[in-house]
Image (cartoon, helix red, strand yellow):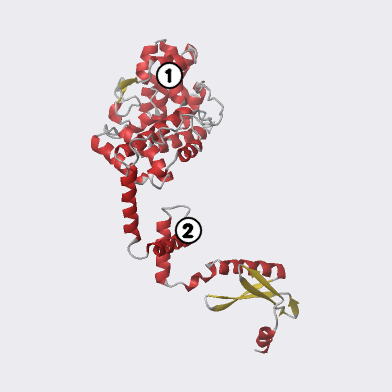
Amino acid sequence: MKKLLQQKKQRPVEIVVEKGQQIAIYHTPDSKVGKVYDSYTVVFIRAGKRVRKRASNLEIARKIATSVARQLGEGVGHIATLTPDQVSDFASAEKILRRHPGRSLASVVAEWEGAIKALGKGSIVAACEAQAKANSKKSGFTPTLVSTVYDEFLAGLERDGASIRYIEDCKSRMGQMKETFRGYIHAVELVDLETWLNAKKISIKTRKNYRTAAVTLWSFAKSKGYLPRDQQTEAELLPNRKRTKAAKLSAEIGTYEPAALRKILVAAPVHLLPVFAIGAFAGLRSSEIHRLTWGNIRPGFIQVDADDSKNAVRRHAPVTIALKEWLAKGKRGQDDERICARYGHENALARSMTKAIRDAGVEPVHNGLRHTFCSARVAVTNDVKQTSREAGNGPEIILKHYVKVLTKAKGTAWFNVRPKECSAKVIPIAA
């Protein structure tokens, strides 16, 4: 008791001042087994209670005192004083704020207080609605959130019976716009769209697809009266290419060697083996494979329905001998079952394929299986029109990108990557 009274009477060796808070540090040496150890105690008030924290030296005590002062100065140190109801209110407010990035609770309350003072009496929401209505009459459009435009556009597509592929594409591209631009669509300017699009590491073709999606959504908003009808939309002003000078994308397509395909097929997980085989020997796009059902795989051909095709045209892709043999190694599902049933979106399928290719010790090539199929097929058949029909591309695309990419010998080797040939190269571990 005497020692405690002496500690209370002694003066602090140092007072840390931070964020308007003063935290005292006392020198409180301790003794154990006849030895005296240096020690310091940081003393402060938190949640109405006196709190002490020990430190072995003065430098550590200063750090503790500085940290505590900052917490108390910013209000974090008093969090324990909040009642359960206050904590519940704070959590609810924080949940609402998540829908409005960049706004803090303090700034929102301050803005509310300013609005109350400016309004005097009445409801702030009613005043805002009246102002929006007045603005609508004056400007000729109704201010509407991007998310609302998106929801109405998607609902219209489903109501009108648009293809599943088109709806999924719109959800993917326009969904990103909805998440990025959380305010009114009329407030999104050209510079906002350009900044968002330029940040994406995508090809010129993919950039055009995103621009098309933006133009479609903004034009829909214009038709609904959510944008001025007599003005060009910001999306329409969006250029197809970046304004900054960028390196030209190579016109050369990437292909796999037969040896690489052999590694991919041998190492492929069971559920991905049909995917790789169909891509390599029938040339289907990954998006087409994602929607393909087992019933579409017939004895002599694979039927790609118009709704599943990129060009919205039904076609028959070949079931080559190699493809037939690789498919026979797995279990065939029900006719109405998708061969990629475990993947809800084609992006998830693409990621799994990329990982499996890397796990096989092969560097992934963008659209490499389809590119190699087209190059090998036209090399073996020497028939541009036939390859065009099977691949679902125009003859001019086959001529421009695939003719003379591979020799006939290399093309033949590609279609000769068969399960039996691969098995012969596997050496049992026991040997």
Residue farthest toward the right in the current orientation of the protein: 35
Residue farthest toward the top in the current orientation of the protein: 382
Image quadrant where one finds the N terminus: bottom right
Q: Is the Cβ of the residue at disc 1 closer than 8 Å to that at disc 2?
A: no
Q: Choose between 211 and 342: the one closer to the eye.
A: 211
Residue 17 placement: quadrant: bottom right
Q: Residue 114: image x %, image y %?
A: 43, 62
Q: Residue 191: image x %, image y %?
A: 48, 39
Residue ID at (41%, 31%) = 209
Total numbered labels? 2
Q: Residue 46: image x %, image y %?
A: 55, 74
| Residue type beneath disc 2 | Ser
**Secondary structure of the residue carrying numbered label 1:** helix
Whether residue 57 is visible: no
Q: Choose between 177 and 261: the one closer to the eye.
A: 177
Mark number displayed over residue 104: 2
Mark number displayed over residue 374: 1
Residue ID at (43%, 12%) = 380
Horizontal arrangement in the rendering, residue 337 relative to residue 427 (left or right): left
